[in-house]
């Protein structure tokens, strides 16, 4: 019985994870675009930190997706 209950939860988690990955990928694309278009040194620094932050989140989400696939 628990296996049947776990399947919808896992499907929901997978769907949420895929949506998070897509949103993060879009944010990463925007951050790269911003970085390419800023001139002010302070904004360049800010863009670099933003890029690093989003890249770390993207890698985390990809690892989570990989773990989810391995467990199914």
Image: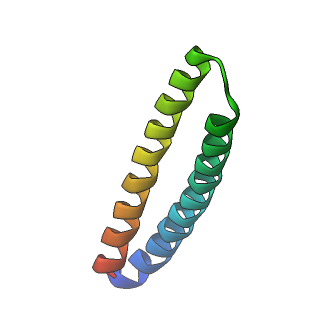
Name the foreground residue: 64 vs 50.
Answer: 50
Name the foreground residue: 9 vs 45.
Answer: 45
State how many labels appear.
0
Residue 52 quadrant: top left
Q: Quadrant of the N terminus?
A: bottom left
Q: Quadrant of the C terminus?
A: bottom left
Q: Is residue 44 left or right of residue 60?
A: right
Q: Is residue 34 left or right of residue 52?
A: right
Residue at image location 67% in from the left, 23% down from the top:
39
Residue at image location 36% in from the left, 62% down from the top:
64
Give how far across and how far down residue 24 sits, in percent: 57, 51
Give how far across and how far down residue 48 sits, in percent: 49, 32
Can you say whether 42 is above or below 31 in the image? above
Q: Is residue 60 left or right of residue 41?
A: left
Name the foreground residue: 21 vs 39.
Answer: 39
Can you say whether 63 is above or below 58 in the image? below
Q: How is the image coloured?
A: rainbow
């Amino acid at each position: 019985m628990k296996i049947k209950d776990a399947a919808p939860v896992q499907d929901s988690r997978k769907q949420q994870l895929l949506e998070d990955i897509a949103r993060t990928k879009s944010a990463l694309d925007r951050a790269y675009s911003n970085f390419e278009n800023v001139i002010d040194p302070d904004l360049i620094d800010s863009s670099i930190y933003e890029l690093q932050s989003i890249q770390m989140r993207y890698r985390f989400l990809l690892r989570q997706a990989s773990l989810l696939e391995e467990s199914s």
